[in-house]
């Protein structure tokens, strides 16, 4: 604790101390982790926003990692050279969009993948504008932070031109904001940090229609909502829309190796045919990361996996009914909402004390996020629901 405070973050140590949360991550397995000192067990219902979609140290991911590193044709690779690993992952990611977004740029993190989306749509459109929503979260690199809520860029004196924020789920506001200098609209399919408010009927389709009419690209950030979390491969499939760019990350690395991707239509991706070396990343799409991501796709695309996510989500929602709060849910992308600001903070603290690790939604503190791993057994669902109901009733 002392060394962490001294060298990594005193602010974090003090903040957690103030909340009475003294967890040091120790052993981890499946949906659980244990405190390093007193071995308290926690259900991980934060999952780092989806990093642990497949649980901690998923045995199939570990087996893939072990097998991969024993091959003499794998390490990080070279970001300039052609790579069979990258080709295979690109092919598989493209197929998740039925080849609509068939061009793939690989990155080490979600923020960088958002950065690629913004840079590329600006380059291709020849326009500078980016419209996003207040309360959004897209990561911490400069363009991603600009697209996110002001609290993530203002303290850093980032005030890059061209960025406009409107209220989420307000189509007329979006319509007013998109003009003939708008390169892209960037939205989380369901904004996690804003408390998982599901888009109103026709909102995303409406935004897409305005984008098409005015020549702006429609970018969906699926870093949290994607890769099966919502019960579909991509959460936007629930809304019947067809984005021009899809951003993914977190779960793509199977909780083991960082990798993220920006999937784009041939029209957008054509930029890299002309400028193949203006955007590269030493660790972006490392060959080892590709091997892990391919295993992640195998697991998420296995027959029955996505249906099981929806079934578990439904079962959990039913079992949580005695709490009496609003449940916002798509698959296992869940938020519990109360009328009062701050209620999500108290709820998260009560859950943590009861052995269920959750966080509140930073940009709507009336909401507690509930993001269990997607691999729960029925018994684990029942145990989790009982613990949450006990903590929150
Ligand atoms: C919706 C969304 N986009 C982008 C990011 C940034 O991803 P990373 O932390 O891997 O840079 C996050 C991270 O929490 C996120 O939730």
Image (cartoon, rainbow, N blue to C red):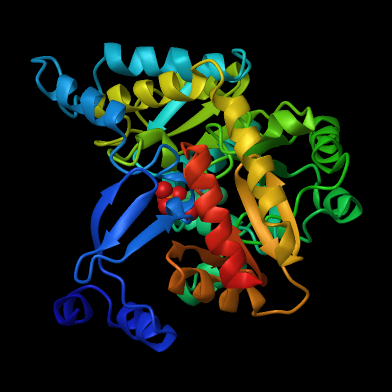
Q: Is residue 305 above or below residue 356?
A: above
Question: Which one is in front, 124 or 53?
Answer: 53
Q: Is residue 315 visible?
A: yes
| Quarter of image, res 165 | bottom right
- In the displayed structure, would residue 303 be above or below residue 241? above
**In the picture, which quadrant includes the C terminus?**
bottom right
| Residue depicted at x 75% and y 65% | 325
Where does the image place residue 139, in percent across and percent down from the top left?
A: 48, 55
Q: Position of residue 320 (x, y in %)?
A: 67, 57
Indicate the position of residue 375 as horizontal and vertical percent values: 46, 36
Drawn side of residue 321 relative to residue 20, left or right:
right
Q: Write the residue at 88% across / 50% down.
A: 171
From the viewer's side, name the closer residue of 311 and 278: 311
Query: Could you tell me if residue 143 is visible in this image?
Result: no
Q: Quadrant of residue 292?
A: top left
Q: Residue at x 53, y 27 (%)?
A: 263
Query: Is 147 or 71 nearer to us in this picture?
Result: 71
- In the visual, does 345 lie left or right of 176? left
Is residue 388 positioned above or below 384 on the image?
Answer: below
Q: Residue at x 35, y 43 (%)?
A: 30
């Amino acid at each position: 604790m002392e060394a962490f405070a001294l060298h990594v973050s005193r602010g974090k140590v003090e903040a957690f101390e103030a909340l009475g949360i003294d967890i040091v991550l120790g052993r981890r397995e499946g949906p659980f982790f244990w405190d390093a000192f007193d071995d308290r067990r926690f259900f991980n219902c934060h999952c780092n926003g989806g990093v642990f979609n497949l649980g901690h140290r998923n045995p199939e991911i570990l087996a893939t990692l072990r097998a991969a590193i024993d091959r003499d044709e794998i390490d990080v690779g070279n970001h300039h050279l052609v790579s069979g690993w990258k080709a295979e992952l690109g092919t598989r990611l493209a197929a998740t969009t039925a080849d609509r977004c068939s061009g793939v740029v690989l990155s080490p993190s979600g923020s960088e993948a958002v950065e690629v989306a913004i840079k590329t749509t600006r380059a291709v459109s020849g326009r500078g504008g980016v419209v996003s929503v207040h309360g959004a979260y897209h990561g911490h690199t400069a363009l991603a932070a600009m697209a996110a809520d002001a609290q993530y860029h203002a303290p850093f004196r980032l005030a890059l031109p061209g960025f406009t924020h409107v209220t989420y789920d307000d189509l007329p506001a979006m319509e007013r904001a998109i003009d003939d200098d708008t390169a892209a609209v960037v939205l989380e399919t369901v904004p996690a940090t804003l408390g998982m408010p599901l888009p109103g009927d026709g909102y995303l389709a409406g935004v897409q229609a305005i984008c098409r009419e005015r020549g702006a690209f429609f970018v969906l950030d699926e870093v949290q909502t994607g890769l099966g979390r919502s019960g579909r491969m991509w959460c936007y499939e629930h809304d019947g829309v067809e984005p021009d760019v899809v951003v993914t990350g977190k779960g793509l690395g199977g909780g083991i190796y960082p990798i993220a991707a920006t999937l784009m239509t041939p029209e957008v991706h054509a930029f890299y045919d002309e400028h193949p070396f203006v955007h590269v990343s030493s660790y972006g799409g490392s060959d080892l990361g590709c091997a892990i991501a391919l295993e992640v796709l195998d697991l998420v695309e296995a027959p029955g996996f996505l249906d099981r996510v929806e079934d578990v989500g439904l079962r959990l929602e039913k079992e949580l009914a005695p709490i009496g709060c609003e449940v916002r849910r798509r698959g296992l992308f869940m938020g519990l909402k109360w009328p009062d600001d701050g209620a999500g903070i108290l709820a998260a603290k009560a859950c943590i004390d009861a052995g269920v690790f959750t966080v509140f939604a930073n940009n709507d503190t009336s909401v507690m996020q509930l993001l269990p791993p997607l691999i729960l057994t029925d018994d684990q669902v029942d145990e989790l629901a009982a613990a949450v109901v006990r903590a929150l009733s």
